[in-house]
Image (cartoon, grey):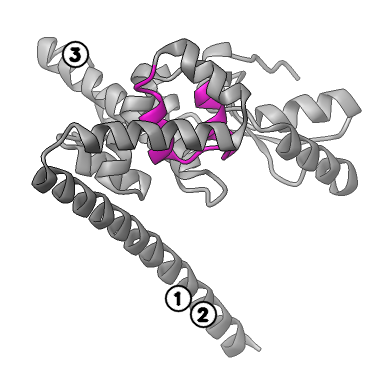
Amino acid sequence: MNITINEELRSFIDPLTHNEYAALERSLLAEGCRDALVLWGDVLIDGHNRYEICSKHQIEFKTVQNSTFASLDDVMLWMIDNHLARRSVSDYQRGVLALRKKDIVAARVAQRAAEPEAAAPAEASKVPESPPWNTREDVAKAARVSSNTISQIERIQKAATPQLVEAVRAGTISINAAANVASLPEAVQIAAVAGGKKELQQAARQVREQKAASKPPKEAAEDAEGDLRAQVASLREKVDVLSAENQALKDRLAALGEVV
């Protein structure tokens, strides 16, 4: 079977951590590859880690075709939506994915506005159009985080060193703390990451204290209140998601009871 690896797609989604990869490898060795790999023609679009492990250990796997895409952007949007729906994806990863989707959608809208007749009617109707995302709230809703969290992720993407980004991905430092540390010079960021969790927390605390000291008391109090409101909004969103999942499980159990 001829399977092509597109490196842009392979690197589009954050890789698994060492522990996640090892757990997946143990599962595949013990149970086989139960989920089919998804292909677009001969290009692999879902299951890169499974394909790598199965090839390494000669584990049999199945494939399924998804021929609904008209472009690589369509594939990327599908990959993003697919990962956003997974519970194992962290808040930071969901925020990054949602921001990537915003960029793709914005570029597509701009291109089509400049060349309204570029796509043939048949092709345009083949792939559903993504709705435009005009505000940070739209991105936050898709990522199931607060708009304040999205703002912090944007700051991290803009100014954080690769070492600090990896610390956020690994859960060594929170998104809020990392956004503060990202305002420091690169050398200080790298040293803080090398110093471990306590050093990162201390660096973030120093930045917060410096910001608070430079603001009038009223403005500082308003910022603290805004942070608390953002945290409450984020927790409420998570509760809503968990409540919906809980209700879905109850419905499934009720349906199984009726069948029995």
What residue is rendered at 52% in x and 32% in y? Answer: 200
Question: Mark 1 belongs to which amino acid?
Answer: Gln
Q: Which quadrant of the figure contains the C terminus? A: bottom right
- Asked whether the viewer can see residue 167, the reply is yes
Task: List x then y, in percent, for residue 98.
Answer: 35, 35
In the image, is residue 129 part of the stretch drawn in magenta?
no
Observer-nearest of 15 and 187: 187
In the image, is residue 182 part of the stretch drawn in magenta?
yes
Tell me the residue that label 3 is attached to: 111
- Left or right side of 120 for 81: right
Tell me the residue that label 2 is attached to: 250
Crowd class of label 1 (few under 14; some 14 to 19; many from 20; radius 10 Å): few
Mark toward the start of the polypeptide (3 vs 2)? 3
Q: Secondary structure at mark 1?
A: helix
Task: List x then y, in percent, for residue 250.
Answer: 51, 80
Q: Secondary structure at mark 3?
A: helix
- Left or right side of 203 for 120: left
Mark toward the start of the polypeptide (1 vs 3)? 3
Task: List x then y, in percent, for residue 66.
Answer: 52, 32
What residue is rendered at 14% in x and 13% in y? Answer: 117
Q: CA distance from mark 1 to mark 3?
A: 42 Å
- Left or right side of 95 for 129: left
Tell me the residue that label 1 is attached to: 247
Q: Which residues are magenta?
A: 163-184
